[in-house]
Image (cartoon, rainbow, N blue to C red):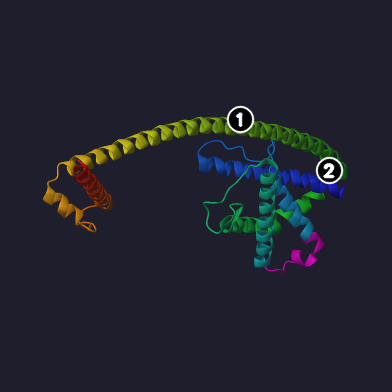
Amino acid sequence: MIVAMLFVEFIFYSFLGWVWESIYCTIMEKKWADRGFLFGPICPIYGSCVIGVTVLFSLIPALSDPTFPVWGTFIICLIGSAIAEFATSWVLEKRFNARWWDYSSMPLNIQGRICLPVSICFGLAGVAIVKWLLPFMSGLHQTIPEIIYVILGLVLAGIFGADFALTEASLSSLLKDVERMHAEFCERSQANYEKVHDEVVSIETRVNEGKQAMAERVSGAKENLSKLHASGLSFNERRILGSIDRFTPSKKRTDDQNNTRLMLTKEMKSFAREHKAKRKDA
C-alpha cells in the first residue's frame, strides 16, 4: 500500500512540476512550451525530488520536528535538487545527446546543468513543500481507502510505463536518424572538400609553372642585357668594371634590387673579360 501511495504521489507531483514549468516557459518564451521528457504531462524529476524528501524526512524524524530550523530544510532541499538536476541532465545527455535545459547564460552555473539562482528557488520551494504540502497530503491519505491507491497506482503505472517505452523508442529512432544525417553530411562535406582541394592544387600547380616560366624569361632577359651592355662598353668602362672587387648595396633599395644589381655587375664583368679575350684572339 505504501509503494502504491508513493507512486501516486510521484505522478501527482510530476504533473504539478509539468504545469509549473510549462506555464513559466510559456511566459518567458511568449509561446506555448510543452515541457518534460516524456510525451505525457509530467516531469519525473519533480516527482522524484518530492518523494525523495518525503522518504528522507520520514526516515529521520528529527528533520520533521517543528523545532528543526527552516534554513536547515532549505539547505537540504537546495543540495538535493542540485544533485538531482545535475544527474538527470547528465544521464539524458549521455543517452540521447540532447539537453532539456541549459543554464549556461545564468550566473554561477556548473556546465550549464545547474546554477545557484535556480537551486535557491528549488530550495525555497522545498521549504514550502515540507512545511505545508506534505502535512496536507498526510492528512489526505487518512481519508482515502487503501484499495483506491492500489487500483490508481496500477493504472498510472501502466500508463507511465507505456509513455516511457514510447518516448524511449521515439527518441532512439530520432537519434539514429540524426546520426545517419550527420554521417551523410560528413561524407558530402568530405567529397566537396576533396573537389575544392583538387581545384586549389591544380591552380597552385599552374601558378607555380607560370612563375617558373616567368623566372626563366627574366633570367634570360638579364643575361641578354648583361651581354648587350658588356659588348658595348668602351675600353675604359671595361677597365673600371673589371677593377670592382665588390658591390656595396644601396640602403634606399630593397634586398631584391640590390641582389639583382650585384648579379648584373658580376655578369657584365664576366662577359667583359670574355669579350676582351675574343678580341685578343682575333
Count of numbered labels shown in the rendering: 2
Q: Is residue 257 magenta?
A: no
Report which residue position mark 2 lands on: 149
Q: Position of residue 147 (x, y in %)?
A: 88, 42
Q: Position of residue 29 (x, y in %)?
A: 51, 40
Badge 2 element: helix
Report which residue position mark 1 lands on: 184
Classed neighbour count for the residue bearing mark 2: other residues with Cα under 10 Å, few (<14), some (14–19), many (≥20): many
253 is higher (above) or lower (below) than 151: below
Badge 1 element: helix
> What is the CA distance from the residue labelled 1 to the residue labelled 2?
51 Å
Residue type beneath disc 1: Glu
The foreground one among 211 and 51 is 211
Residue, far front: 281
Q: Quadrant of residue 186?
A: top right
Q: Which mark is residue 276?
A: none
Q: Quadrant of residue 37?
A: top right
Q: Is residue 8 left or right of residue 175?
A: right
Classed neighbour count for the residue bearing mark 1: other residues with Cα under 10 Å, few (<14), some (14–19), many (≥20): few
Q: Residue at x 66, y 66 (%)?
A: 70
Which quadrant, please, contains the C terminus?
A: top left
> Sequence-wise, which precedes: disc 1 or disc 2?
2
Boundaries of the magenta span: 57-69
163 is higher (above) or lower (below) than 5: above
Q: Residue at x 40, y 32 (%)?
A: 206
The foreground one among 13 and 191 is 191
Image marks 1 and 2: residues in contact by CB distance under 8 Å: no
Q: Position of residue 117 (x, y in %)?
A: 56, 57
Residue type beneath disc 2: Tyr
Q: Position of residue 218 (x, y in %)?
A: 28, 38
